Amino acid sequence: MRRKIIIAEDEPLMARSMRNICREEGLESPTEVNSCRDLLAALRDANFSHLVLDLTLADGNAMEVLDKIVVRYPALEIMVNSNKPTKLYAQTLRQRYGIRYLSKGEKEEVALRRLLAFFNNQDIDIKPVSDSTESPFDRLTATEKELLPYLLKGMSPNQISQQIGKSSSAVRTHKQNILDKTETENVVELKELAALYNISVSTDGWTNVQKKRHIGF
């Protein structure tokens, strides 16, 4: 099988490291992009077999285009390479999209082994997929779930306090609790995690959760 690899990575050092791995393994030099826009354009122009995808690219959150990529290119093997929490992302990405996850914090020798297995279409050291993957949003209290849609809309604590009748200081406390429970650093990461778990904001302000179809290996 001829492997044609594309790397979507915003960190030059990480992209260079993967490029070196491909060269040392005698693989074709990969195509490299650093934005969602360039990634989609490259996928349209060439028939790639493998994609290594960072979730944070130069022009935004790659989760916003992942659905489109999975649907349009069902034969494309995808591995997400990110510094996002493994326990929140790895199992869910595999279960909902049928794609793999490699943490940027992984030990070098382990990362190399996983990358080579990915490029050779081998499945190693992966735990079985469970149909009952816990969502980090299930940990939120009723009040925190009430605040979540406003945060996902990008509203400030002062704006939210006017909407729900709580003080801005109370809103800030609840916001921090939400970030802590979802293991996110800010609202940008919270939105990314919400996209991963299919959390959407309805017109009446409540949060709806809909399951995507499972696309297996």
Image (cartoon, grey):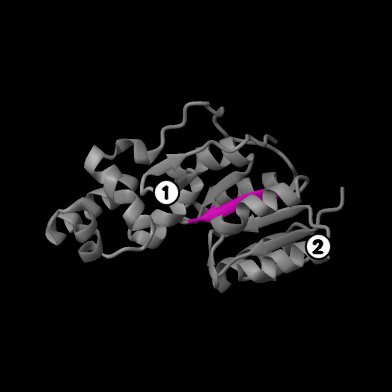
Magenta includes 200?
no
Q: Which residue is mark 2?
A: 28
Residue occupying image coordinates x 71% and y 47%: 71
Callout 1: helix, strand or loop?
loop
Residue 188 seen by the camera: yes
Quadrant where the C terminus lies? Answer: top right
| SS label for mark 2 | loop
Identify the residue shown where x is 19% and y is 58%. Answer: 161
Choose between 159 and 178: the one closer to the eye: 159
The residue at the point 42 percent across, 56 percent down is 191
Q: Is residue 177 shown above or below 27?
A: above
In this rendering, does residue 141 appear at all? no
Amino acid type, callout 2: Glu
- Residue 80 part of the magenta segment: yes
Q: Are marks 2 and 1 in contact (CB under 8 Å)?
A: no
Q: Residue 85: give its label.
A: 1
Q: Main secondary structure of the magenta part?
A: strand
| Residue 108 x, y percent position in the rendering | 53, 54
| Front-most of residues 2 and 179 | 179
Quick check: 113 left or right of 26?
Answer: left
Range covered by the magenta-colored residues: 77-82
Mark 2 Cα within 10 Å, few/some/many (few <14, many 20+)? few
Q: How far across and down, in percent of the image, does residue 35 sit?
A: 61, 70
114 vs 200, left or right, is right
Q: Position of residue 68 (x, y in %)?
A: 67, 53
Label of residue 56 in the image: none
Residue type highlighted by circle 1: Pro
Q: Is residue 209 left or right of residue 96?
A: left
The quadrant holding residue 184 is bottom left
216 lies above or below 20? above
Tell me which numbered mark, 2 or 1, is placed earlier along the sequence.
2
Q: Tell whether 160 sits left or right of 28.
A: left
